[in-house]
Amino acid sequence: MGKILQTGSKRNKIMSKKNIGIIIGLVVLVVIAILLTRNNQPGQNNTSQQQTATTPTPEPSAPTTGGKLSYTDAVKKYGSNRIQFDATCQAHPNNVTFKAGTQVMFDNRAAVARVINFNGAKYTLAAYGYLIVSMTAAKYPASILVDCGSSQNVATVLIQK
């Protein structure tokens, strides 16, 4: 009879360890669910922040228009008239030609804000933000170098009449 109790005791210990493991797993799932719920509350959704157009802070003479489109709609609208700045502040594409007056999307794909120097103006792009810049110059053709943060000459933009 002593052996039967001993076997039952071992079985209870095993069941107890399994129950503890299940309880810990459930607690972890609840914590994850709470964190996901907090991130998806209105006003705190990271996706909507990525899709919000930034307001440029150019010098007064710089021609720009603030975008009111969602990020997805802006990408569709401007298509290949877009220069993306990646996490290391490199421009893609880095050598482009546009006709005067063309609207171009400056697109920050980094998780931090970026300052872009273009054609004598400074533009602040929020993290994952964008803005629209009109390609103009004092005389044509104009070859303009683009700086991103402390990285200089990350792109060359040729503007033709």
Image (spheres, rainbow, N blue to C red):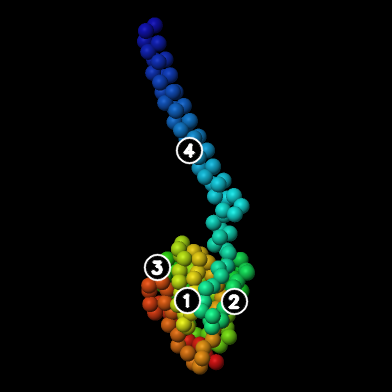
Amino acid type of disc 1? Lys
Q: Which residue is mark 3?
A: 88
In percent of width and height, residue 155 lies at: 43, 79
The image quadrant of residue 45 is bottom right
- Of mark 1 and mark 2, the one earlier in the sequence is 2
Q: Which residue is mark 1?
A: 122
For mark 2, give the secondary structure. Answer: strand
In percent of width and height, residue 50 lies at: 54, 62
- Camera-near label (4 vs 3) is 3
Q: CA distance from mark 1 to mark 3?
A: 18 Å
- Of mark 4 and mark 1, the one earlier in the sequence is 4
- Of mark 1 and mark 3, the one earlier in the sequence is 3
Question: Where's the C terminus, which quadrant?
Answer: bottom right
Nearer to the camera, 34 or 94: 34
Q: Is residue 40 above or below residue 12?
A: below
Q: Residue at x 43, y 19 (%)?
A: 12
Q: Which residue is mark 2?
A: 65
Q: Is residue 106 visible?
A: no
Q: CA distance from mark 1 to mark 2?
A: 14 Å
Q: CA distance from mark 4 to mark 3?
A: 35 Å
CB atoms of marks 2 and 3 within 8 Å:
no
Amino acid type of disc 4? Val
- Camera-near label (2 vs 3) is 2
In the picture, the disc for residue 28 is 4
CA neighbours of label 4 inside 10 A, class few (<14), some (14 to 19), many (20+): few
- Camera-near label (4 vs 1) is 1
Q: Is residue 139 above or below residue 120?
A: below
- Of mark 2 and mark 4, the one earlier in the sequence is 4
